[in-house]
Amino acid sequence: MKIAFDEAFFDSDYSDDNAALPGRMEAALSSIDPGRWSTLVPEPATITQLLRVHDGEYIESIAAKPRLFAVARIAAGAAITAAEAAYAGEPCFACIRPPGHHAYRDRAWGYCVFNNIVLALMELRENHAIESAFVIDIDQHTGDGTRSLLGDWSGATVFNPFAEDAATYLKLIEARLSEIREVSIIAVSAGFDAYKLDVGHKLSRSDFRSIGALVRRASVRASKGRRFAVLEGGYYLPDLGSNVHAFCEGFE
Ligand SMILES: [Zn+2]
């Protein structure tokens, strides 16, 4: 497995929201051993790539804020890198910010700018003509932007599990993943804000490991092992790194 990452994500001044919190990316990476999972350094997403998903006017409005535009393009590029690695047979976790799952074609909210996971899937459609994709979004918040952007693609499924407690949540994920017959790729919007000490007050570190493993097993069975994940939310910094690490251990 690989980690897609760029030092540009250490910039905490691109915005003043929670995703841009100082120290957040350092925390997310704190338990990752670079000797175990090496880093893929991405290229920024090109305008051509952005235009596959977003309106030109919207892209221009972001480009008017150069610092934000720079980091958001690299985040999208890292998601694309992760998807390409996954397609080639190497699972990958894109440890990125700003997040993307609340980004629509012409607007975004919830700390998001460009829809990283959709940009990544559209790249695979363009380059490899993939027919289908299954997106599981484990962030505490529904990936409304992702759902909207993939709505026109009949081969795409977006699954936002919802349950009040962790045990039911895991059962729901297991059941839904077991229904997948065959799919070109499985992608995870990996938010960590459903953590028991974060805003979701639900999942434990070992639950994140279990979710990673459930996706891995489903992927080995149904998508030729092709799978990648992109970071979305997650704001409880003391445990963000161990939760990311636990997910990656299961996902590997
Ligand atoms: Zn969230």
Image (cartoon, helix red, strand yellow):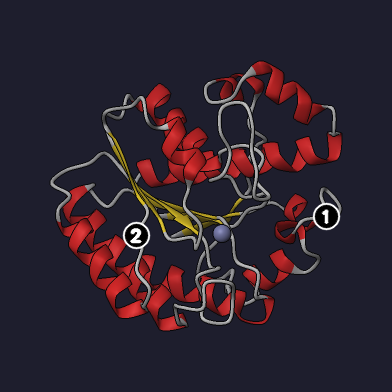
Q: Does the residue labelled 2 lie within 8 Å of ligand 1?
A: no
Q: Are discs 1 and 2 less than 8 Å apart at CB?
A: no
Q: Is residue 137 above or below residue 144?
A: below
Residue 216, position in %: x, y?
29, 62
Q: Which of 38 and 226 is in front in this view?
A: 226
Residue 189, position in %: x, y?
46, 53
Say which residue appears at 49% left-offset and 46% top-offset. Answer: 82
- Indicate which disc residue 5 carries: none
Q: Choose top left, top right, bottom left or bottom right for residue 193.
A: bottom right
Where the C terminus falls, by quadrant? bottom left
Q: What element carries label 2?
A: loop
Say which residue appears at 56% left-offset and 33% top-offset. Answer: 104
Label 2 sits on residue: 161
- Indicate the quadrant of ligand 1 in the picture: bottom right
Where the N terminus falls, by quadrant? bottom left
Q: Choose top left, top right, bottom left or bottom right for residue 163.
A: bottom left
Q: Is mark 1 on a helix, strand or loop?
A: loop
N-term mark: 1 or 2: 1
Q: Is residue 76 above or below residue 164?
A: above
Say which residue appears at 70% left-offset and 24% top-offset. Answer: 59
Crowding at mark 1 (Cα within 10 Å: few <14, some 14-19, many 20+)? few
Label 1 sits on residue: 16
Q: Distance between the residues labelled 1 and 2?
A: 29 Å
At label 2, the amino acid type is Pro
Q: In this view, does 55 lie above or below 3?
A: above
